[in-house]
Every structure is written in C-alpha cells, then in structure tokens.
Image (cartoon, grey):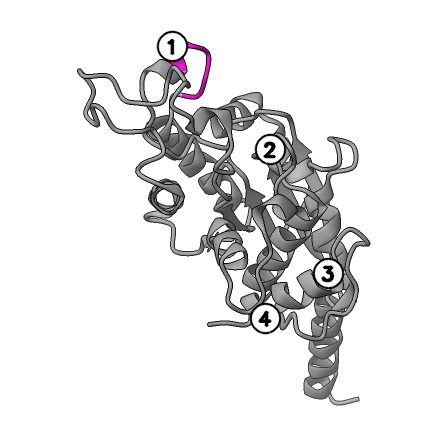
Amino acid sequence: MNKTFLAFVVTLLLSVLASAQPIKVLFVGNSFTYEPGDVSNPALPENFKAIALALQADVQVDAIVKGGQTMKRHFDEGEVAKKLQSTKYDYVILQAQSIEPLELPKCFPDNGGPIGRSEFVEYAKKLITLIQNSGATPVVFAHWTYKKDHSWLQASFPCLKFASNEVHAGKNWYGADLIEYQNLLNEGFTLATEGSASVILSKVGNQWQALMGSELGNVPDAALYQEDNFHPTTVGSFFSAMVLARDILSIDLNPLTKHPADVTEAQFQTMKRVLSVP
C-alpha cells in the first residue's frame, strides 16, 4: 500500500475516533447548580446532559458542588485543580455564590456573608486560569437575581443599604430594581472574564428575565423560583440547562421534544421561543 495513502487513512481514522469522543463537562458551583436535587444528584448537570443527548450531542457530566460555596472556597480547597489534573474536560462551568459578583455593603461580610465583587473577580480569574491551563474552555454561568419577595430585598433587612461612609452610601445593595440588580450581577461576571478571550459568558439570568416578561407567552416567577425566593424549581433548572446547552454547544433547541413532567408543554414551547430570539 502506498505510504502516503496509508498515512492519510491513519489520520482519517484518528480524526473519526477523536470526533467520536464524548464532550466532557464539569460543573463547579453550589446550590444553584444542584437544586432542586442534592449534592449527590445535582439537577442542572443532569438536565444539561438530557438535553444534549436528546439533540444527538454525546455529553458526559461531572460536578463539584457544595452549598453556599464561593469562588475562593472552590479555589482554596483544591478539588477543582485535582479534577482538572485527573480528567480531560472540554468545558468547565463556574457558578458563583448568589450575590458575590456584586459590590456589597460592609454589613454583609461583617455578619458572615460574602465580601463581594473584589474577592469574586480575583478567584474567578484564578479558576479560569486553571481551567485554561488544563486545555478546557471556561464557562461563566451568569445566574439570576433573587425573586422580588426575598427578605433581603425588603425595607426591614438590616444590610439593605450601603452605610453613609461607603462609596454607594444610601443605595440598596441590589440597585433600584431587579433589572439593575441583574445588570450589576452581569458587570461582576463580565469583569471576571476580562483578559481571557476563550471564556464563554452565558447570561442565564437575562434569559430568566426574558422568559418572565416575554410577550411570546409569559412564564411567571413563581414557576422558576422555589418558595425560598432564590433557588430554582425544576422549571428554572431545566430552562437554565437549555440556555447553557445553547451557549456552550451551539445547538438548535427547536427540535427538542422532551422535558421534565413539572414543566408544562406551554412553558416548554415558550422557553424554546424565547431562546430562539437572537
């Protein structure tokens, strides 16, 4: 056999074998990733996998999730670094603690809460560098706001406003309304991606807002949030997985026909319509 032809055949076979390998995705986060499941059976990765497989994308998922976990804790504990050394992932999804991408009143860390944006950006960047050095593509999961009924958005909340001696004196920690709140979250997520060209920023929270206010068929906030006013329901988790699948895998969601029993057919069709808008 001609050596040149043999080399071509070998290269072709290797290419076919490589393309047949599953896409490996690691989820790094906290309860926003595992609710309404648990740490041993996280909902978001399983929804993501189910959507991908239904659309003929061979995906394997893995997760490092702990309740309340911040980017700093994930970095300091070292489990992410060990995973990246032991397994070759294609994508690693970073999901932050719910309000750490924001600039926060000092009242929060003084009472055991997150420091806020400065720490978030520092450690998100460190994790992004680890991921890139491993050969994987980092994905920043830009999550949703708290629901308007959350106790921390009410006048009675002790840490509602910045103190008189702080930069944003007198302002609410979340801004003027939920739209500004989402924009402030996105600012923090965007800062974490600066200087890293390969990072995918998936604005899941923006899509939640679009879904709840869509003229294509409104899905109320009560369908997306659990009764605690910040964790996702099955509907919220499944929709978040749809956004991530679209943004990461660049797949058309319109052929998707299966959805969890808790998601109504009307909600499902509205989700697809919202996500098909450029």
Say which of marks 2 and 4 sits in front: 4
- CB-based contact (under 8 Å), mark 3 and mark 4: no
Cα separation between marks 4 and 1 = 44 Å
- Residue 251 x/y as whole percent: 62, 70
Say which of marks 3 and 4 sits in front: 4
Say which of marks 1 and 3 sits in front: 1
Q: Is residue 76 above or below residue 217?
A: above
Say which of marks 1 and 2 sits in front: 1
Chain-order first, disc 3 or disc 2? 3
Give the quarter of the figure containing the N terminus: bottom right
Cα separation between marks 1 and 2 = 28 Å
Q: Is residue 218 magenta?
A: no
Chain-order first, disc 2 or disc 4? 2
Q: Which residue is mark 1?
A: 110
- Residue 19 x/y as whole percent: 71, 69
Q: Amino acid at mark 2?
A: Val
Q: Which residue is mark 3?
A: 51
Q: Relative to residue 181, is residue 4 drawn left or right?
A: right
Q: Which residue is mark 4?
A: 273
Which image quadrant is residue 165 in? top left
Q: Amino acid at mark 3?
A: Ile
Q: Secondary structure beneath disc 3?
A: helix
Q: Which residues are magenta?
A: 109-114
